[in-house]
Image: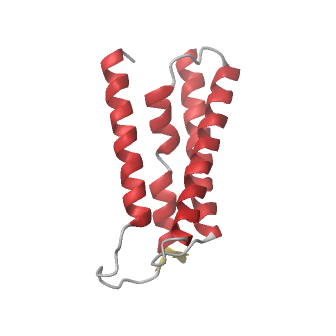
């Protein structure tokens, strides 16, 4: 990826992190009521999964430049996953202190499951890129 594309990927990553903050801390009291489940799964867990799924991929696009060996890729994706977990944990702790949102360990679980799956897919993609 050339320099201008990497800069654009970093801008997209920052914008995406802002959207996560907005989604996690915004007031959404006036939205219409909907069914609380999608295919038997609570919709808020589906939203958390979808919200955090692209994070490892965006981090890879924005930051990965030096993974020339499989172990480099593995270390990068573990690091990206752990940073994503810190962000997810921070949003849940932050929601606890807002007074208008609640913290939920299952939201954190949905976030980490999404990032783990995406990290695995990006790891496979990065290994294929090296061959």
Foreground pick, 101 / 97: 97
Foreground pick, 67 / 83: 83
Position of 24 relative to 67 (above/below): below
Q: How many marks?
A: 0
> Quadrant of the rendered structure where residue 81 is?
top right
Residue farthest right in this picture: 71
Q: Position of residue 131 (x, y in %)?
A: 58, 14
> Quadrant of the rendered structure where residue 112 is?
bottom right
Foreground pick, 44 / 37: 44
Q: Position of residue 57 (x, y in %)?
A: 48, 38
Q: Quadrant of the N terminus?
A: top left
Q: Position of residue 73 (x, y in %)?
A: 63, 25
Q: Position of residue 78 (x, y in %)?
A: 66, 36
Q: Residue at x 55, y 35 (%)?
A: 122
Q: Is 13 left, or right, of 128 in this rendering?
A: left
Q: Residue at x 49, y 35 (%)?
A: 59
Q: Residue at x 59, y 37 (%)?
A: 80
In this picture the colour scheme is: secondary structure
Position of 44 relative to 20 (above/below): below
Q: Is 11 left, or right, of 113 in this rendering?
A: left
> Quadrant of the rendered structure where residue 107 is?
bottom right
Q: Residue at x 30, y 79 (%)?
A: 31
């Amino acid at each position: 990826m050339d320099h201008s594309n990497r800069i654009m990927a970093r801008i997209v990553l920052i914008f995406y992190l802002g959207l996560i903050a907005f989604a996690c801390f915004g007031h959404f009291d006036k939205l219409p009521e909907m069914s609380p489940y999608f295919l038997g799964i609570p919709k808020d867990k589906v939203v958390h999964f979808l919200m955090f799924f692209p994070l490892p991929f965006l981090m890879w696009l924005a930051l990965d430049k030096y993974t020339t060996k499989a172990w480099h890729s593995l270390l990068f994706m573990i690091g990206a996953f752990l940073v994503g977990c810190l962000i997810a944990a921070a949003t849940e702790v932050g929601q606890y202190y807002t007074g208008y949102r609640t913290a939920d360990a299952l939201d954190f679980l949905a976030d980490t499951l999404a990032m783990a799956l995406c990290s695995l897919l990006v790891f496979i993609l990065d290994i294929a890129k090296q061959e």
